[in-house]
Amino acid sequence: MLIFDQLKRDDPQLRVVTFVVLGGLSVLLAGLWWVQVVSARDYQESLDNQSYRTVRIPAVRGKILDCNGAVLAENRPAYDVCLYLEELGKPFAAAAQREVATARAQRNHQMAQEVKRLGRKLTKAERKKFVLTTKEKEECRARARFEVASNVVQQVSQRLGEPLTLDPVSFEKHYETKLVLPYPIVSNLDPAKIARFEEQSTSPLGVDLDVQSVRVYPHGTLAAHLIGWLKRDNSSMEGEESFFSYRLPDFRGEVGIEFACDKELRGMAGAESVLVNNVGYRQTENVWSPAEPGHNVVLTLDLAVQQAAEEALRRAPHVNFVNYLPPVRGAVVVMDVRTGDILALASSPTLDPNWFAQGLTTEEWQRISALQAEKNRATYENYMPGSVFKTVVALAALEAGLNPLERIHFDANPAKPTKAYILVHGHPIHDTAPPGDYDLRRAMMLSCNSYFITIGLRLGPERIIRMAEHFHFGEVLGLGTRQDSPGTLPTLQRLTEGWSDRNTANISIGQDPIWVTPLQVAVMTSALANGGRVLKPRLVDHVEPLDPLSGEAPVRFPSGQVRDQLSVNPRNLGWLATAMLADTEDPEGTGKHVRDEFPLSGLRICGKTGTAQVQDVHNNNIGQTTWFASFAPYENPRWAVVVMVEEGASGGTTCSHIAGPIYNALLKREQAAKTVAKGR
Amino acid sequence: MFDANLNEPQARLDRLQLAALAGLMLLGAAFVYSARMASEPNLVWYSQSWFRQVIWYGLGIGAGAAVCLLDYRTLARWAFVVYWLSIVPLLAVLVRGIGTTHGWGAMRWIDLGFFQFQPSEFAKLAFILAEAHFLSRPVEELRNPGNFFKALGLLALPFLLIMTEPDLGSALVLLPTGMLMLYAAGTPKRYLAWLLGSGSALAGLFLVTVLFVPPNWQLIKLEDYQRRRLLVYFGCEDSPATNLPRAEQDRLRKELRKQQFDDSHNVRQAEISVGSGGLLGKGWRHGTQNALGFLPRAVAHNDFIFSVIAEEKGFLGSVLVLTLYGTVLFTGIRIAGQARDRLGRLLAVGVVTLLFSHVFINIGMNIRIMPVTGVPLPLLSYGGSSVLGSLIAMGLLQNVYIYRKAY
């Protein structure tokens, strides 16, 4: 063979030359083996790192629907006019070249003048001062880029008939950090502008429309607190690729159903890899995992009932605007007493979740937070239940053997002869009911404090609290909406630590130290109505795929989940229901205003009004929370309607009035359902 | 004179070598095309680099054939004329106005309008011719120190001139070529040992000064970019002058580090190209490093052509390239062995070592076992001077082969 021939020959010098060449080629071969075969993977990785950028593509968010399929939250496309920088690469380079040439010419001119001034040739060090530094060249390039882009923006501006400017700082930042992504010139074009932009067949170089998905809530403020809203969040979810070079804007639920069902709604973000060149311009792209759209969430909410509830709450009569200015502050909960389905959940004042999707200014946010409009008053604000809590005390007393027909007499208050009063350890407690004889029915109907304080003191605090614990007061309901407050219920432990009869008297009439949310009261009312089952409130009926043809089965959430059983004598619940019925039907009843607007013929409503005094540390009344907790129909209860208004005139005049139109809406709903059933 | 050889049983030309050369030229044209594809998409085919390269191959083959027309011994009579003629443009290129930098910061080219003439390519050949001629004298005469130093002087003149351009790479390839020629000529071992010893001592001193002494203390003033290239190769960090305040030093150090990162860009990208080629490569014209411009387009088709081949044809492609060069080199050594006289033998050794040095330095640079120097890969790199020079050198080899028999 060629090489061995030479090695065999007796020619030491050429043998050395052969060895040198052979050795050199072997070294190269070994080196190449090392680089190309042994470490090929590392180099491939470096190659991928420098030439691929990964971009996270958010998935289309699922819709939120009411129980009849009405849309409460959906998405609409938003059109942006964007600059695709990679297409401007050549003009950028050309302009940069011109810019650098101009700068260089200027320097040369300066240098020539310097030569003239000194009358001699410049030294190397002196010449160096006139050479453009890398930084200066980079500045020239940036300037050139901005000019080119600015010209394009002006063309777009003319076409749209809208003055547009390019912000140099944000443009440069985008160029340096997000070159692969298009740079938005105008966001959220209205249809007229889209038409104007598309009118001419050719766009200016590097300009095109980009579509993004924007969350919209077609009913605006309706059920805003329950539906919730979004916040900007591009981060990766669990089970998703976590490393991305770039992330397109994405949103995540902040509160409400948007938060509670965020995982179902948001779907799975996709990923795209973009091949870039050495400057970082996009060359080609490849979607390697397409985004999977989110699921639709169907609520138990009924749009019509919700509308009625919000409307009624907005028009709340006789609100005493002393502690705050309109709009009314209050909440309404409508619950199906058999299943725990929430048919309406209103909180006022409300807000428009669309604001969050479009971006909120600081002032707007301040306005919202001044009203505490972001709070869901039905689930997140604690109130003293006042007389509404008397139902719990009465039930505990009946269970302990109270004779509902026993009459107890209360004298007239010397200070206010038309009203009764009671002395607890020598302290007079004023009543709003007149003096006279009271049995349970009359005491409930007229909301006689003296009666309930008497039976409460007879009963002792422990049994009241044990009964309240059955209703799960003082515990969160587990809504997952991030606006779920437990309220306060004194523990049995608390009774051993400086508990006085005055405290017992207070909780007997639902005053401090017991605090509840309107939804908790709705759960309580439902339990009284349905024979003692304390239900879990149900907000979501089912989650279904966005595409009904996908074949994926919807996930249904079980209804009528029992959290606790009161295990009370049904006769006692009957006594209570009768007493509550009197509250709306007896001419003397405090809740009779429920029929002010609508006759609600044939519907027999059991109700309990309440007015809790809000006191400051010196026991001065500084406000009041008014309530109406009710269920209907009396014969076969189906709905619980709980109304709470801050600073209402009284539970009767303000809150029971509000409940009227809601019951009317519920009756209509039932009527409609019957018609549909008949039609089939 | 060809008639006299008509009945020769042996081939008049070394066909194996010619086949390997043809293979290299084919590869060269194909990969110059691939490397320039992204840079000249709109040019007509006859203005594209690959076609110009083919023209240069044609001209080079013509020049190589022309060299074979005359017996190398006849050519060698003109050796010193050629040598001095080659020194003239080496001097001329240093004169501002004749030489041009092409914006690269080194005066290596003479602009002839149609052709950017690189005198060092031809000076290398002239040196081989002259040195072979000088050393072909009887071995006894080489024991004379005067002759030894004359031989060194023949090497030193073009070496220093090319260094001044500066073109470190082209100058450096002269050293192993000269050394091996001296050795093959039978120069006494003690001279060579002395040369090697003092040479390495000087080189060591040079490197230590460049790499570790702060700039304001340095005795040898290299061009900034040369110094930095060496720093990149040896993985050393440049240090700012020590007489500056601490904060200023830190700032400079940071800047130097960034600069070093930028400086090592070409090598890093070349290495990524070679490495990402893997065993089989990405396929001709499918290399991304060059297409996306990570491998700088200005050098992809000349100094870094090997990384384009390695990326697109993988380790197998690299082996092919090495095999082709190996064939040329070993046939060259065989020609040296078969040469009829010392002159032919030395000419062949000179051409072989020159070619080998180019190959080793250029490919070594792609896998970072050699520093970056602007040494072309013979016949593969784009460039008229290099192609012409290489083919003329091959013509010399064939010449030695053709006239190996005494008539």
Image: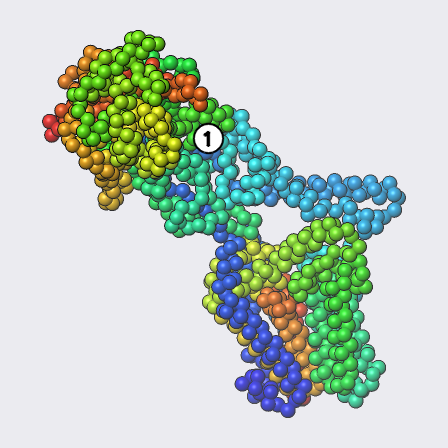
Please tell me whether residue A124 is drawn above or below residue B150 in the rendered image. Answer: above
Residue B405: quarter of image: bottom right
For the residue pair B289 and A614, the one nearer the viewer reads as A614
At horizontal 78% and vertical 41% (from top left) the residue drawn is: A109
Tell me residue B94's x, y (percent): 78, 60
Disc 1 crowd rating (10 Å Cα; few below 14, some 14-19, many 20+) is few
Residue B41 in sight here = no
At horizontal 33% and vertical 26% (from top left) the residue drawn is: A501
The quadrant of the rendering that contains the C terminus of chain B is bottom right
Chain on which label 1 sits: A
Q: How is the image coloured?
A: rainbow
Please tell me whether residue A446 is drawn above or below residue B125 in the rendered image. Answer: above
- Circle 1 sits on which residue? A359
Residue at the right extreme? A119
For the residue pair A47 and B5, the one nearer the viewer reads as A47
At horizontal 59% and vertical 82% (from top left) the residue drawn is: B12
Residue A182 in sight here = yes
Residue B382: quarter of image: bottom right
